[in-house]
Image (spheres, rainbow, N blue to C red):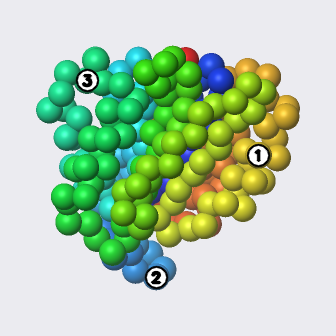
Amino acid sequence: MSAILAVCGENFCAMASDGRMVEEPATLGKPHILTEELPKLRKVNRNVCVGFAGDTLAAVQAVNALDEYNVQYLTFEKVVKVLCARLREINVLPLGVRFLVGGRGRKGGFQMATFSTDNGCQPEIRPAQPGAFLIEGACAHTDVAPLLDEYLRAGAEKWRTLDDIAASLEDCIRAIAARDETANDKIYRQLIY
């Protein structure tokens, strides 16, 4: 359940998620919808944003571990470390959880981390590069790679403003929702710049 997308450039990180939460395991046909209005992202502070897809209850437990700290002072690196450590301690449905973390690192540059229960919560951290975008996405029941290519990577050269990027993220979420009944087109966004 859930879809999360992120675009990170040298001066910003933008994330978008849908709002549907379904009972797992999702059944073929019509899944049992628990809510239509659950954002799968959180702006931790002015420097870091977190998004997730998969087992929502497990992901929320991991995100709530951040509240044990004064979140105002949490760095990108510390957020990734806390989430990975907490996720390893939580019982997760076979569906798994995938996290995207974006924002400014300790040295001020924008970067993105991806990790999941599938890879033992080993984060892959990539710094943003001048003139390029880091683009990531996850959905619990749909392969989003072709949609990222179609809606984000293919149009990136036309992006001139953050509104252009937001529109592409929203189009991609809508495309996911059209293919996957565990996602909807209620869109939530966060921006770090």
Mark 1 lies on residue: 153
- Answer with mark 3 or mark 1, whichever residue precedes in sequence: 3
- Answer with mark 3 or mark 2, whichever residue precedes in sequence: 2
User: Relative to 109, is 1 above or below?
Assistant: below
- Label 3 or label 2, whichever lies nearer to me, is 3
Q: Nearer the viewer, residue 36 or 87?
A: 87
Q: CA distance from mark 3 to mark 2?
A: 40 Å
Considering the image in quadrants, where does the N terminus appear?
bottom left
Residue kind at label 3, given as amino acid type: Val
Q: Nearer the viewer, residue 190 or 96?
A: 96
User: Relative to 116, is 169 above or below?
Assistant: above
Numbered label attached to residue 71: 3
Numbered label attached to residue 28: 2
Numbered label attached to residue 187: none
- Answer with mark 1 or mark 2, whichever residue precedes in sequence: 2
**Residue 120 appears anywhere in the view:** yes
User: Relative to 176, is 80 above or below?
Assistant: above
- Label 1 or label 2, whichever lies nearer to me, is 1
Q: Nearer the viewer, residue 115 or 98?
A: 115
Q: CA distance from mark 1 to mark 2?
A: 30 Å
Residue that extends furthest to the front in the rendered view of this protein: 107
Considering the image in quadrants, where does the C terminus appear?
top right
Secondary structure category for the residue under label 2: loop
Secondary structure category for the residue under label 1: helix
Residue that extends furthest to the bottom in the rendered view of this protein: 28
Residue kind at label 2, given as amino acid type: Leu
User: Relative to 183, is 18 above or below?
Assistant: above
| Picture coordinates of residue 81, whole percent (x, y) | 31, 41
Q: Are marks 1 and 2 in contact (CB under 8 Å)?
A: no
